[in-house]
Image (cartoon, rainbow, N blue to C red):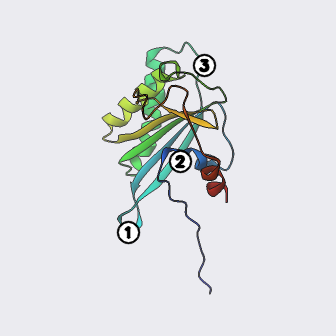
């Protein structure tokens, strides 16, 4: 029987991760939270262990509800043996400042829940599909307030 080839994409940057999200899920999400668990894979390299997607909650949720959402997101990723996560909030709205990014309270709760489970957060990102912002970076030299454009070459590479 001939050997099968499983194509792999190396996710080596926030841009590559965000470009890969539609391929990881099988569709392009909108108004979503996407969380990828990362654990030790073959040959000692990190691999994605689980990808979750859920709708962004509406405004005005109580803190306890956000905490429950965060806890419920952490449990299955912890079961996979993941040691890190990447959190992405995906929408179609661009923002001019990291202070304005939506779902900040939920992202903070997610980071706390993963910390409580012994899982570190590699990055927490927001994207409008063409640019990205980091929830944890306020240094304008690496994280400009207007966001960083995700290069078309990265989006094309991942799509191919």
Above-or-below relation of 103 to 74: above
Q: Residue 122 appears at what percent x and percent y? A: 39, 42
- Disc 3 element: loop
Residue drawn at the location 62% of the way across and 48% of the way down? 25
Residue drawn at the location 33% of the way across and 38% of the way down? 117
Q: In which quarter of the image is the N terminus?
A: bottom right
Q: Give the labeled residue for mark 2.
A: 17
Residue drawn at the location 59% of the way across and 82% of the way down? 3
Q: Residue 95 appears at what percent x and percent y? A: 58, 23
Cα gap from disc 2 to disc 1, whole angstroms: 21 Å
Cα gap from disc 3 to disc 1, whole angstroms: 42 Å
Q: Reading the chain from its start, which is encountered first: label 2 or label 3?
A: 2
Q: Give the labeled residue for mark 3.
A: 58
Residue drawn at the location 44% of the way across and 16% of the way down? 63
Give residue 43's mark: 1
| 10 Å crowding of disc 2: few (<14), some (14-19), many (20+) | many
Q: In which quarter of the image is the C terminus?
A: bottom right
| 10 Å crowding of disc 1: few (<14), some (14-19), many (20+) | few
């Amino acid at each position: 029987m001939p050997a099968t080839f499983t194509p792999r994409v190396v996710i080596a940057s926030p841009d590559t991760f965000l470009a890969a999200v539609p391929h990881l899920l099988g569709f392009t999400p909108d108004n979503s939270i996407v969380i990828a668990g990362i654990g030790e894979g073959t040959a000692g390299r990190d691999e994605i262990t689980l990808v979750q997607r859920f709708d962004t909650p509406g405004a005005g949720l109580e803190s306890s509800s956000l905490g429950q959402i965060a806890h419920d997101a952490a449990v299955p990723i912890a079961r996979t043996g993941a040691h890190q996560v990447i959190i992405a909030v995906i929408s179609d709205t661009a923002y001019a400042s990291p202070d304005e990014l939506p779902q900040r309270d939920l992202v903070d709760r997610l980071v706390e829940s993963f910390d409580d489970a012994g899982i570190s957060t590699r990055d927490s990102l927001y994207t409008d599909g063409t640019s990205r912002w980091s929830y944890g970076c306020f240094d304008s030299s690496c994280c400009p307030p207007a966001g960083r454009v995700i290069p078309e070459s990265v989006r094309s590479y991942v799509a191919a």
